[in-house]
Amino acid sequence: MTTHTADLLNNRYSARGFRPDPVPQDLLDKIFAQSLKAASNCNTQPWHVMVVSGDMRDTVSNAMLAEVMSGKGPSPEFEWNVKYQDEHKDRQWGSAMALYGAMDIAREDKPARMQAMGRNWQFFGAPHGAFFTMEKYLGIMGAVDVGIYAQTLSLLLEENGIQSCMQGALGQFPGPVKKLLNIPDSRGILFGMSFGYADDHPANKCRTDRVELSEAVQFFS
């Protein structure tokens, strides 16, 4: 049966709980090879993806958590800390409320919220994590291309019954990750993604809404 892109978009969600079972390597090879068909400006294909699994996944997770727990602030290599305003702030707030509501975590329960946040650097229990990197000099245009690539990859994973979660948090503490994965200084980590087979974690019940077409798109003729 043919899977339509609209179905993939309707079914996809940001999974934050995974079974430990790894995705077979031959399937990963197929999916990541297909993802290279993603569009990019002038066909520059600026993405360089670092995928961690098994022992390396655990080592990277532990290193990120140690950095977080050390009290050091985030040190992203690209500007990401946008102060959302107006409707964007409202949507951010709504997303957080939906997520913590699904996990039955009250707004005032700061320890539980911090624990939930910490799961970012544990890949939410997923057996695989990916770091999306590019040469720093490429700037905003390179970031646009990497975003196109990441969406393509996410939909291909969904098509194969594999869930994922895009995570800006995986780009917040790049130091230990770059050292462990031998990423050169000229390349920066934009963001990351956890992926695998979703489990029944309460966070996976979270769904966010979308604005009406008339609010997001204008047609001119």
Image (spheres, rainbow, N blue to C red):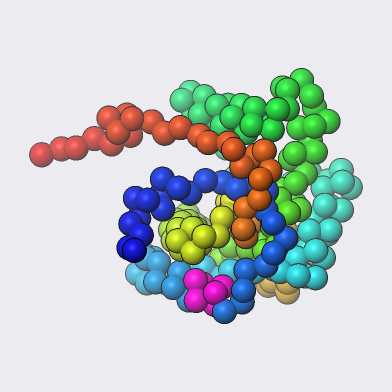
Position of residue 49 measured from the top left corner of the image (x, y, whole percent):
58, 69
Residue 45 higher or lower than 61, as above or below: below
- Count the marks: 0
Membership of 46 in magenta stretch: no
Residue occupying the point 49% across, 58% down: 158
Q: Quadrant of residue 126?
A: bottom right
Q: Main secondary structure of the magenta part?
A: helix
Residue 11 drawn above or below residue 116: below
Using the rendered view, name the quadrant where residue 190 is placed.
bottom right
Pinpoint residue 191: horizontal percent, then vertical percent.
61, 55
Q: Is residue 138 toward the left or the right of residue 78 in the image?
A: left
Residue ranking furthest to the left: 221
Span highlighted in magenta in the image: 27-32
Residue at the right extreme, as displayed? 70
User: Residue 201: where, in percent of width, then height?
Assistant: 68, 43
As rendered, which of 59 and 25 lies closer to the eye?
A: 25
- Specify whether residue 30 is painted magenta: yes
Q: Which quadrant of the rendered structure holds the C terminus?
A: top left
Q: Left of 141 or right of it: where is 2? A: left
Can residue 98 be seen by looking at this rendering?
Answer: yes
**Residue at x-position 79% and y-position 35%:** 114
Position of 95 relative to 36 (above/below): above
